[in-house]
Amino acid sequence: RNYFFIFQRCCIRNIRRQLDKHITFHRYIAYMICVHTAIHLGAHIFNVERYVEAYNSRDEARRDLLLRLSSLRDNPTAGTTYLNFIDSPNTDAVKEALKTLSGVSGVVITLVLIVMVSSATELIRRSYFEIFWFTHHLFIIFFIGLIVHGFQGIVRRQTNVAEHDPVACMNSSSTWGTPGGCPNPQFAGLEPNAWKWVAGPLAIYFIERLVRFWRSKQVVVVSKVVQHPSKVFELQLKKKGFKMGPGQYIFLQCPSLSSLEWHPFTLTSAPEDDFFSVHIRRAGDWTEALAKACYVDDGEFQSSRKMPRSGNFIQKIYNMESLEYMGAQCSLFMDFVGILPKI
């Protein structure tokens, strides 16, 4: 959110306009992650099965070559390094895969991805938002697993192609490492690269979280609560140094009711007022509980000491000033909507 302020200052209008589609972009990226995860998983299942079959290949022409390559182990004395991480024939491919860091981390991040995607459906989001919110934060486990996924280096490449030509030496595997024969092939694991793609976005995310935490310590006060007809009440709030503009709305959150529910309300005050306000109709459990927390039914104005207090942080989105409140009882986040006082 805070980076939107930077983007709207440094980017041209057509690019800034695309910020309004960031959720759609996020979904498309998630879909592509799911597709490529399925491809990646399928390829490795096939690969592990081929590793097991290499000890007793049905291809008679290459059986000796595959057996020779699979029998290579890390042995400094003999000058050999392994290619096939499965070190014995007639074994279970799944069990062998789960003995590796890559196998365990792969299973973990795949399960996390399934949980995140399934809980992000519209039905879950609307009916069980807290489940969606908590499971979506499993992305931390997902990224940790992604970073360590390739550390063991079980996907390997030959490092001495110049000395051991694969084409010239493939038919003489029985003489490898002997005088007059080809030298033993040397293999090394591919270097892990996932962290290079993840480090930057994670650093940006944690900086964002630190900025939010710092700004959440600023104080916002509910200065007045007004009861109106038709089950409507008005909250008037103040924040030192803040000036609202037309075209804004807020997301209201009360942790005492739900730590994760955010409800949008149009700002109904004018920019010239020394406060900003919202009008809320009591139309459900959450709004009824909010009215009770703000003493709407007490019949007289309550001291500001009894009103919900909160911290806040300011941001700007799409050239509109925004405000977020994070506090002990009531939290607010303000975007843009609501131009009634200006009409």
Image (cartoon, grey):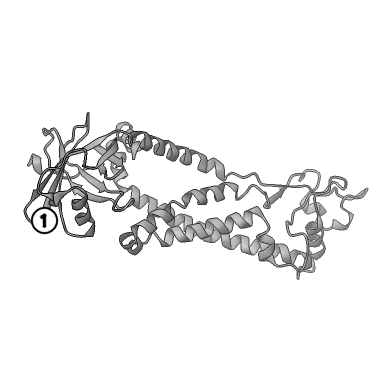
Q: Residue at x 31, y 35 (%)?
A: 5
- Callout 1: few (<14), some (14-19), or many (20+) C-alpha neighbours within 10 Å? few
Q: Residue at x 41, y 54 (%)?
A: 134
- Looking at the image, which residue sits at the far top? 241
Judge left or right: residue 54 versus residue 25. Answer: right
Q: Is residue 105 above or below residue 337?
A: below
Return the residue nearer the eye: 14 or 199.
Answer: 199
Q: Position of residue 57 (x, y in %)?
A: 76, 68
Identified by mark 1, the residue type is: Lys
Quarter of the image that includes the N terminus: top left
Return the residue nearer the eye: 138 or 219.
Answer: 219
Q: Is residue 162 above or below residue 241?
A: below
Judge left or right: residue 337 versus residue 57. Answer: left
The residue at which mark 1 appears reads as: 231
Return the residue nearer the eye: 214 or 15.
Answer: 214
- Looking at the image, which residue sits at the far right? 179
Q: Position of residue 253 (x, y in %)?
A: 27, 48
The answer to whether residue 320 is visible is: no
Q: Residue at x 68, y 64 (%)?
A: 95
Quarter of the image that includes the C terminus: top left
